[in-house]
Amino acid sequence: MSTQSPKLTRLFRLLQRISQREASRVSGEGDHSGQEERTRFAEKAARQYIQPADLSDERWEAMKRKTLLNWHHEQERMAKRKSHRPWALALEVGFAVAVAALLLWPDSHPFEPSSGSDVEEAASLAIEQLGPVLRSENSFFIGRVDNHAASDSEQVKEGIRLQTIRQLDEPENIDTNLANRNEQGSSALLETGQYVFNADAKQPLSMEIGTRISANLYAHGALTFVRHRGRLVPLVHGRADFSVKPGREPVFVLTPRAVVEVVGTKFSVHVHKSENWEKVAVREGKVLYYDRERSFSLALTARQSATWNQDAKKPVVTEEFPQTPSPRSVDGNGTIRKKEHVPHHASPKRAENPPQSPKQRHVGTPMGAPAKEEDLPADNTTTHATLEIPSVDVAIDKLPELSDDDSSGVFQRRDTGDSKQTQGSWTQNLLTLPPLERHNVERYYDAIETFMKDGYTQRALTSLQEYIDDHPGFVNERAMFLVAECYKSLGDHKKALEAYRHYLKKYPKGSWRIHAKLSIGELE
Amino acid sequence: MRDEIVNELIRRCRKGEESAYGELFDEIRPDVLRILHTVVGPVQDLEDIIQTIFLELFRSLPNFRRDSKFSTWLYRLVYNVALQQIRRRRIVPGRTDVDAILESLAGTTPNPLQVSEKKEMIELVSQALDSLGPKKRTVLVLHDIEEHSLDEVAELTGVGKLTVKSRLYYARKEFAKKIRQIFILSEAKTTEAIDRQRTKKD
């Protein structure tokens, strides 16, 4: 503190002048000789004011003793609290670790949808990158404006295998020249801006999408990859199983109607473009499923799936994926994983009643085809191409050779109602197969049904006959019934009757026996 | 030199030396008392507040990051704790010990006649400062008496510069109202004395 106090002095001088004027006005001209001295004294008094009288040493000592004693007790209390409550320390450490993890690991953000504009922009960009996606009456084709066949060799980099197609109803145009195609299947590394179309009805296309995303794209599915404020995988059509490792960038799978936001999980997305339905099934982890307008947002956890049918306002969530049989892993060469497949029966065309629960979703399958407990992919059903019916050579070697007796009655115990009884045998028999074989069988029959539905009955019949010859086990039960159906459809009633009778003879308690008997009655 | 001593004591306190707390107490107690007096004015029972201030200071020592001087940090701590205590304890300002001030200014008042007048003046000055609220008084004392700049006052009190200016304006206004009474009263007394002398002569 300064001994001279100009500011205070100025203040007092000012006050002095004011007071002199006021005093003169009140009492006339007075003697102001003492004012100067008074001002100085007042100023000194004001300065002295801020110098409080010091307390006595005794008081200070007493205060010091008390303060230090209190401080000592406080420290003891704190130490005791920590030692008596080790969980509190653990809690503090755990909390700190959790906060640090949240800060350092961006992908561990809570399941809040990203902003709508981002996804919308990304979707636009994805469509732009994807090129024209055209849909005609009987064909579905995808491709860029330019001629890809000419530039494929230039675009294909090391490790990248692109399979392109221009028009599915012209099989000769399919470019199946995959350099690394082998017995195990095919593989591709998809990079930004490239799209892939799997025209192989037999094997899924296993690919790495950018980094940390691996996917199996099933037959006739088409997807692309865009990196824009995250990793975007627009799935235009078909089904793909994804396995996403946690990373810094968010991952979105864009379907025509919605968005699947991923954090780090394994899931499956199935889009049927022409029938306008889609389905998301989660195997591990958690995904967010929401539409572009954010009218709904579903957090799907493991073993849950959401099916969004054509006319529904929002998807229906169902529990999926029974615990058994256990999933199979996939190898890096594109061999088939255990299928957490999107049920093709969920299609509005295929099921009058959209699936509400696993038990309900098999009702009403076309052609009376029995459903199974675990749905298999239906990629083949989505195409109208005149492709050769794929064989199931991979699976057939491993099929168990069950006797007719086995196939007809062993698994009837769960059948209760009449309709269920006709279906239970086939369904339960299928469950005895390993997942790989079961998947191939189901895919084959799905393809046959599609061909029959689309008018390729003769081709289906030929394939079925070959299949029966090649597969003497119970798996041909459905083929035998379908052969009869094919004859009936072709108008050859005599052969149809023979085929129905042959079926009933071989499978007297078969799943389609009632249908067969009704057809016999009808044809006779 | 003093800063070095204080910093060394702080370092020892952070290490957990019990004796360092006592030494720090002794070292900074005049500052604490002065700041406290500026903020709360004349209060008889300062012990409890002082103890609270020192306990809070010991608790906050690990948080002293040396971004500012220790004196600044101490001022803000004492200022905040004092305001908190005023609110909690509803402390009513007492009266300044006029005799103590007069005693400290005794050298300048040899004439007993003047003593009563000066005592009266000290009382008025003290009353003027006592009557100010804690925030206004602090600003007035820091700026006009202790000669701190507006920025320094803002830093010490932890408020904005404009707030300091505003408080200073109102503090001076209130203070001036009281102080003017000193001069007017003195003037009136002087005039009265002159009139009385004239009457006697006549």
Image: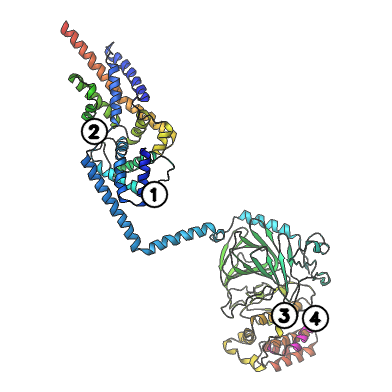
Residue that badge 3 annotates: A444
For this rendering, which residue is in front, A314 or A459? A459
Mark nearer the N terminus (2 vs 1): 1
Q: Is residue A464 magenta?
A: yes
Q: Is residue A222 visible?
A: no
Task: State whether the magenta stretch is mostly helix, strand or loop.
Answer: helix
Q: Residues within 10 Å of mark 2 (few under 14, many from 20)?
A: some
The CA span between labels 2 and 1 is 37 Å
The CA span between labels 3 and 2 is 102 Å
- Is circle 3 on the same chain as circle 2? no
Q: Amino acid at mark 4?
A: Arg
Location of residue B131 with respect to B23 vertically, above or below: above
Q: Read off the magenta span.
A: A458-474
Residue that badge 1 annotates: B62
Q: Amino acid at mark 3?
A: Tyr
The percent coordinates of residue A75 (x first, y second) are 31, 54
- Chain containing the residue with disc 1: B
Location of residue B114 with respect to A336 vertically, above or below: above
Quarter holding the C terminus of chain B is top left
